[in-house]
Amino acid sequence: MSEPAALRFVKGIGPKRAAALEAVGIASAAGLLEVLPFRWEDRRAFARVADLVPGGPDTTLDLRVASARLIRTRQRGFSIFQATLEDASGAIKAVWYNQPYLERVFTKGARVVVFGHAEIDRRGEIVLANPDYERLDADDAAGVHTGRIVPVYRKLGGLTSKALRAAMHGVVEGLGPADVLDPVPAEVRLRHGLLSHADALAGTHFPPGEVSMTDLAERRTPPQRTLAFTEIFLVQLALAARRDAAVKAPRAAHYEIPEALREKLAKVLPFKLTGAQKRVLREIGDDLRSPHPMSRLLQGDVGSGKTIVALMALLVAIDNGHQGALMAPTEILADQHARNILALLQRSGLPVKVAVLTGSQKAAARRRALADIANGHAQLVIGTHALFEAGVTFKRLGLVVVDEQHRFGVMQRAALVSKGSRPDVLVMTATPIPRSLALTLYGDLDLSVLDELPPGRTPITTVVRTEKDRARVYTGLRQEIARGRQAYVVVPLVEETARTDLKAATAFASFLKKEVMPDLVVGLLHGRMKGDEKDRVMSAFARGAIQVLVATTVVEVGVDVPNASVMIVEHAERFGLFQLHQLRGRVGRGSAKSYCVLMVGEDGRGAASERLRTMEATSDGFKIAEKDLELRGPGAVFGTQQHGLSDLQFLAVILRDPALLDAARAEAQRLASEGRAEGLLAELTGGWRQRLELPALG
Ligand code: ADP
Ligand code: MG
């Protein structure tokens, strides 16, 4: 490849902007082109003011500023910027809140392009509220910012969408065939009817005039499909290469699962395993006896019984003379695992030494645990993030289990894995990742699914309630308590550490305690409490000494108190659907009928009602995740930020077009099996390499 064109020589960029872009990691014109628009605007022809209808679709208008003024309200720091904008057909009012600097953009007579829809304001006037805008200057070239479908970018390195568009246009104009490397081999491109990378980028930034806006929005145009294929192909190539390396690497030790061990394991089991649990254990057992280290993702809905599966695997490793580590995302969960596992071990008489390691342990306990882990005395180590900290040394770490893995960053997992010499790895999650996405995020993992709940569970009744139902809700809660059951009341925190919110949670707990249920034992649990204090509250709740537990979302994942049968979620509209599913999963764990009450504030009622109705309608985690995906996007639902994949602009395509994924994956695997993966990956530019480095399990 020729030297990448330096940014500062690109028309429309110059030294200052080039430096700003370099500061955010974009060093060349080719690198800049990889920054894709997040949407496109149809500026081939503009809508007319006269044709605007309230509640109509988003449209683009080409307007002139007739007048504008900033209104400061009596409320401090709150301002409204109001402009009257006109075209040949008429004038319309536009308003923006708290953007006083707009005074400098919307100067009288300026030409602005705005994008938004009309609505009726409180005075009954038709208005554009908070539309997107772009000021056009007299010397702005037609054909870049108007008269075509234009790309809209997220701000980057201080450059606005418009500045980026100008820069991209400059780059695309000057693009020679040798300026952009083709990451996909020509034979593969040919076979799948793909464009060259340069053409794909150019056609994505500046789509030709006849393209359909819907196709663009859904990433279906030929240039976009080429880019999606490329991205998936490269990720799959990297995963295949990694997988090949892992397969070639032999495991540190051979495991065996003799009959005697099977009998021991059977004694630990407090119940009969479900068919799904048995099947998954067979899959894990096969991995553990195979000559190569295990890398397995165990996916199972809330309450499907992942913990016992993990424990069985850990006991196999331990029986074979290795240490096992179980990592949980919260102290509450780590302590709960320790408590439950110790009880199971004790009951069965299996002599396994357990050490617990959490962040807020007392110094002496921590020292003891660290020593035991280092000298191998501790066979099973249960803990939080503390497990992968620098000072922790394992004697012989054989198996790493990561519970609720989506709560951990990939790097954190890798840090723990690196404490052993190629240990087996089992990661567990309740998030029902669609197969296509799982392959992308975890293509180097084998997948096991627990698709069966333990028997005897009664479905949970879920209802949405408002303030006026509150008294009735508490009556219901009391009835359940009178039956000997327990309840959670979850209050949202914007941030677990925010003081004001914490005060609200504490205040709510004492309100319940004093005003509503003075005769009941009410406890409070939140993330800012000390470790042993949390453990005290949680154990008290687990043994039934606390009847109503007011908690923040620290109880969202993993907490298992089967006697609890009521989950009340305050301000349910503030939670994501899948989060609500996880919260609801804290009840319905025993055989008793359980209830989940979603309280909504009056304000949240309208917008939230559709989302929350999903919760009333189904308890199927997969359906809920799908809906959540639709409403909030993959990043929010699957925590893909943690995989470095928020950059994967085409996650949406992956979900919608599994055939494309399969094709890209098949090609990548074929090339890898021919030994060509490393070579192809080595040719990639820095930007790509950075992105591909991240979805590593270590
Ligand atoms: P999750 O998959 O959400 O981590 P857990 O492992 O916490 O689920 O299990 C949920 C509850 O179901 C626990 O109380 C556990 O003891 C119980 N459980 C798990 N497997 C079975 C089974 N096969 N039969 C009966 N109860 C089970
Ligand atoms: Mg769990």
Image: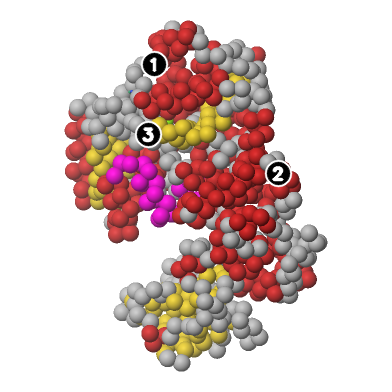
Residue 550's image quarter? top left
Q: Image height check: is 280 above or below 182?
A: above
Mark sitting on residue 8: none
The label nearer to you, 2 versus 3, is: 2
Q: Is residue 77 left or right of residue 506?
A: right
Residue visible at 39% across and 46% down in the picture? 625
Q: Is residue 58 left or right of residue 356?
A: left
Mark nearer the N terminus (3 vs 1): 1
Quote the CA–CA distance across marks 2 and 1.
47 Å
Q: Image height check: is 237 above or below 400?
A: below
Helix, strand or loop at mark 3: loop
Residue bearing mark 3 = 451
Mark sitting on residue 676: 2
Q: Quadrant of the C terminus?
A: top right
User: What residue range appears in magenta?
Assistant: 618-639
Residue 254's image quarter? top right
**Considering depth in this image, is 424 or 615 the residue closer to the camera?**
424
Helix, strand or loop at mark 1: loop
> Which x, y percent locates residue 362?
56, 22
Residue 249's image quarter? top right
> Where ligand 1 lies, by image quadrant?
top left
> Which x, y percent locates residue 534?
44, 29
- Regarding residue 243, the answer to whether it shows in the image is yes
